[in-house]
Image (cartoon, helix red, strand yellow):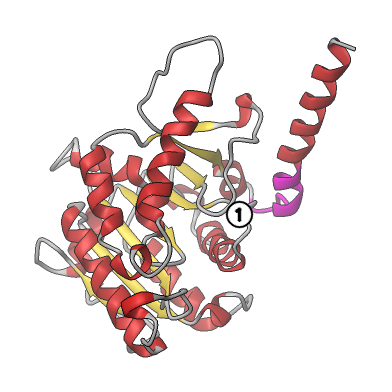
Amino acid sequence: MRLRFSRPEADVFVPGGGEPATALARVTHLCVAAHQDDIEILAHDAICDCLDAPGVRAFGGVVVTDGAGSPRTGVYSDFTDEKMRAVRRDEQRRAAELGGYAIQLQLAHPSADVKRPGHVGVAADLAAIFAGCAPESVHLHQPADKHDTHVAVFLRCLEALRALPPERRPRQVLGAEVWRDLDWLVDADKVALDSGRRPALAAELLRTFDSQVTGGKRYDLAAQGRRLAHATFHTSHATDRLAGITWAMDLTPLVADPTRDVADFTLAYIDRLRADVAARLARFR
């Protein structure tokens, strides 16, 4: 079976060579993200999980948008959107090689299309991807993210996952931080992703996106600094258990029950934080 997507610019890359459909079918850990470099920020733990179990686990990456709207300075300041799309596509391919991904898909949708509920091309592409693999774990953007495109990609993915037969839905679906940290969650709601492993690889993966790093956004320093900060500030009365943490929400209940309201589910996290703060203040007044 040949993988076909709705945009002619869509890029299908199998770093190890071979048939794309076969590579996709091997994926046990899938990350579907909005932009080039989002995967490497939010799913480093899954990349490491797969590298630690070659032949048993396989990582797959999906970038939904074309990356044309990224900020740019320095040597990239005069790049057109078309040239920036090409640069970012190649950077994502290089990251897939470095990270040992089984497959890297770049769907090349404009952000405006992803933000439109019911867009036929976006829905068809995501449906084809989820039909072509049966991952045990899926990493997505988290619904409290402050980047509009991230939230839209999350919602389109949720729609695609809910459309699967119950027996085909992944065992675990996680929403991890990129824009807007999740350290504000109460501890009982936090899922700690072990992203302190393979720090040299983490740095190399993030530096691969030179159009961002030297183009004005030091994601290479910021992402790793946040992971270390989370590991240290996680708890005040114990030594650090992990070298780096990416915080995530468990989104599995949203997929398992398609009738659950996304806004109610997300705002409940804020309600629990509010109750926690109020209770702590009341204890010591």
Mark 1 = which residue?
Answer: 145
Quarter of the image containing the C terminus?
top right
- Report if residue 24 lies within the magenta region: no
Quarter of the image containing the N terminus?
bottom left
Secondary structure category for the residue under label 1 = loop
Query: Pointer 1: residues within 10 angstroms few (<14), some, or many (20+)?
Result: some
- Quadrant location of residue 125? bottom left
Q: Residue at x 57, y 51 (%)?
A: 142
Q: Which residue lies furthest to the front in this view?
A: 74
Secondary structure that dominates the magenta span = helix
Q: In this view, does 244 lie to the left or right of 249?
A: left
Magenta range is: 258-267
Query: Where is 164 relative to 191, above or below?
Result: below
Q: At which x and y percent is residue 170? A: 43, 47
Q: Which residue is drawn at 37% across and 56% down?
A: 39
Tell me, yes or no, if residue 31 can be seen here: no
Q: At which x and y percent is residue 105? A: 30, 69
